[in-house]
Image (cartoon, rainbow, N blue to C red):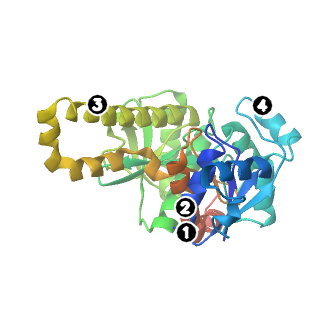
Amino acid sequence: MVILLDAMGGDNAPDANIKGAVEAIHQIEAEVLLIGNEEIINSRVKELYGKESISQISPKLKIYHTSETIEMCDIPTQAIKHKKDSSMVVGFNLLKEGAGDVFISAGNSGALLTGATLLVGRIKGIDRPALAGILPAYKGRLLLIDCGSNTNCKPINLLQFAQMSSIYLKSTFGMESPRIGLLNIGTEETKGNELVKESYQLLKEKSEELGINFVGNVEGRDAMSGTIDVLVTDGFTGNVFLKTVEGMGKLIKKLLTENLKKNIFTTIGAIPSLPAIKAFSKEMDYKEYGGALFLGVKKPVIKAHGSSDEKLFEFTIKQAEQFVKNKAVDKMIEEFEKLPK
């Protein structure tokens, strides 16, 4: 198995990408192919590890040279069209050609989504692929879809997001009947804007036919209560929700740390609780959950957070190997073709 990693994408590239790959390579069976400027990557490897090339760290780490980089400020469609030797475009082409099994990038989100759709291609029958991010929830995890790829949606898109997430959780995690909730400002079916109200009615009408366990509207405060497995929404709302949750997690961790270190008494008093505090901190850390899966395209693609550090790249690389091993995309294609259109 070969994991394709965009070494030039992200706010902390290429250092975080390199460090994450180095940490992950000792924990996975796959090879990691870093795609980007070979001179820059090896110069950073020499600075960070004292090696002349990254392959000296592990023979499972290799570089595929590219001369261009898609920047965060680039217009997505133009960047994909004109920067053909960029790390992202080359990565997609290698994935499409079968030279790799999964592609990871923390680069320009719009370009990543455009490239995945245009270069790799959508699964037949899916109108719009969507980003599915994993968040902590009470005694489990929550799949949030869409968390940033489609800012303007139609009810059919939200229905298909529910279909894709249900198939993914059933085939990959063995969930018999994943509980699907629709993000709304109230639980009543009359609440919400036109998109949400129409989506509710469509989900209510089609759920039994499509094998979706739709449990109704869910308010944001109840999303992580453990009563649902999937939260469906449009990409604009989902991205706001995702970043709010991440920000709240950081705030709780910061306030907890400050209060425990407030004085000698709070510090001493916290010692017996340290194992529980560490476990809590780990569960609340979004870095533990890896990147967002781009469901609906023909090959495995993972969007890592733009501000990913080495830890998040490490977890995302491990997540990518599992994604491929579970044959999630193959199962998605197979199951979606069976569904009534």
Give the residue type at disc 2: Ala
Q: Residue at x 44, y 51 (%)?
A: 288
Packing grade of label 3 (10 A; few <14, some 14-19, many >=20) is few
The residue to which callout 2 is attached is 24
C-alpha span from label 2 to label 4: 32 Å
In the rendered image of this protein, does residue 150 appear above or below residue 64? above
In the rendered image of this protein, does residue 124 appear above or below residue 77? below
Q: Earlier in the sequence, mark 2 or mark 4?
A: 2
Q: Secondary structure at mark 1?
A: loop
Identify which residue, 110 or 40, lies in the foreground.
40
The residue to which callout 1 is attached is 28
The residue to which callout 3 is attached is 255
Q: On the rendered structure, is 169 left or right of 86?
A: left
Q: Earlier in the sequence, mark 3 or mark 1?
A: 1
Q: If the image is split into quadrants, where does the N terminus sit?
A: bottom right
Q: Secondary structure at mark 2?
A: helix
The residue to which callout 4 is attached is 75
